[in-house]
Amino acid sequence: MRAPVRIVHLGLGGFFRAHQAWYTGAAPDAGRWGIAAFTGRSRGLADDLARQDGRYTLIVRGPSHDEMAVQEAVVKALPGTDTAAWSAHLALPEVAVVTLTVTESAYAEGGVVARRLVDGLAARRAAGAGPLAVVSCDNLPRNGSRTADVVTALAASTDPALAPWIRDSVSFVDTMVDRITPRTRPEDVEVVLAETGWADAVPVVTEPFTEWVLSGDFPAGRPAWDARFVDDVHPYETRKLLLLNGGHSLLAYAGSARGHETIAAAVADPVCRGWLDDWWDEAARYVPLPAGDVLAYRKALLERFANPRIRHTLAQIAADGSQKVPIRALPVVRGERAAGRVPVGGVRILAAWIDHLRGIGAPVKDAGAAAYRERAGSARDVLTLLAPDLATDEVLLAEIRKALR
Ligand SMILES: NC(=O)c1ccc[n+]([C@@H]2O[C@H](COP(=O)([O-])OP(=O)(O)OC[C@H]3O[C@@H](n4cnc5c(N)ncnc54)[C@H](O)[C@@H]3O)[C@@H](O)[C@H]2O)c1
Ligand SMILES: O=P(O)(O)OC[C@@H](O)[C@@H](O)[C@H](O)[C@H](O)CO
């Protein structure tokens, strides 16, 4: 017997299956919590997974060996284009939690997050199905508040009675999510077949490390996830966004420009490693956690990045830089300039991203990049668009120009 659907997910992909679905399947009350998972837009993965009744193999790939286990928490896989099914699921009174992993760009005003949640929550209100929690698991600062803002803004302009209902009935939970999950490759399908005899069309590869920190209420309940529940997620999300994701973006642009293809290859290059240390030294000043904790996190992170069996491509991480660079680099650059220092690591990220916009290193795959590419010939013009407050900082501009290839 499969668990009943009590969680609805939007953004069925690799990360959700390695993280939230894994936590749900591993919880002691897993039998009470099934997930109906919708893709963000395309239908291929939903169809493949539906053919396997939602089951798939999670390959936990350590530096020396793999561990594999079939995951059962996803009981339905549906295409994001089936908006009727989406609203019908959100209107079920037994559904208590909605989770999201739809990438940073989907949180833009009028994007998928706002549209789908407003439609689904309107159906829930009409059905009298009661309160629930919405948990954004995307790499955005204050992801819960960000979700609340875009959803309530759209509700207020399209369905004025819905906005107060959302305020009273929906809890937007802030989270920090962490588990490096590269895109599945054809070789991974073959490894599962050879190891287990099952021709799983859609396995997921992930690293052994995993972390989930949450802050907020679950008015209709939640699984007994083995996660950390705190009053304020901010210190943890800052640690992760600046050190891990910021480090990733640095290597994605600067490492690919040096001919590397993966994170592991880039950190094995002493030049890239030096750049990473520069970035971590300055970014660490902005992580509001004890210095010893930050140092331990850096040490563990380096081991995670160096895992040679995880092929996390720089091209995958480089995508959507226009959404990621402001979150991952600018807080540090602004802080350092306000303190009168030259942010060597932050400058490296900005210069490498401008080089990338100019066609150096990983290819540009970013729906928000057109305006930046038009201006990529001039560092000042890029900064004017990215961070107008920094575009007249002549010291910063001179350093960026020096760091360009
Ligand atoms: N992969 C990781 O290591 C990792 C770790 C932590 C957090 N995350 C978060 O999870 C997100 C998804 O990562 P993934 O590895 O599962 O990617 P993926 O490509 O496997 O899946 C992405 C999902 O999001 C949907 N999507 C993408 N862009 C969209 C858009 N603009 N509008 C609507 N839907 C969209 C896709 O249809 C798909 O369902 C990341 O962007 C990040 O915010 C990923
Ligand atoms: O998933 P993105 O596109 O937001 O960012 C790419 C990586 O930096 C990211 O996926 C990390 O691997 C992840 O955040 C680790 O938990």
Image (spheres, rainbow, N blue to C red):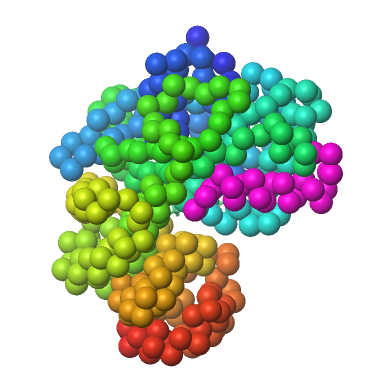
Magenta span covers which residues?
141-162
Tell whether 257 sits left or right of 103.
left
Q: Residue at image x 31%, y 63%? A: 285
Q: Measured from the top left, where is residue 144 in percent x and y?
A: 56, 44
Instruction: Look at the magenta stretch and give its main secondary structure.
Output: helix
Q: Measured from the top left, where is residue 229 in percent x and y?
A: 43, 33
Residue 207 is drawn in which quadrant? top left
Q: Decide whether residue 160 is among the magenta residues.
A: yes
Q: Measured from the top left, where is residue 186 in percent x and y?
A: 36, 44
Q: Nearer the viewer, residue 279 or 196?
A: 279
Q: Measured from the top left, where is residue 169 in percent x and y?
A: 70, 31
Q: Decide whether residue 32 is among the magenta residues.
A: no
Q: Residue at image x 40%, y 70%? A: 335
Residue furthest to the top: 1
Q: Nearer the viewer, residue 82 or 236?
A: 236
Residue 31 in view in this figure: yes
Tell whether 50 sits left or right of 165.
left
Q: Residue at image x 83%, y 48%? A: 158
Q: Is residue 348 above or below residue 188?
A: below
Quarter of the rendering occupied by the C terminus: bottom left
Q: Residue at image x 42%, y 62%? A: 328
Q: How many discs mark residues in the rendered view? A: 0
Residue 38 is drawn in which quadrant? top right
Q: Nearer the viewer, residue 148 or 69?
A: 148
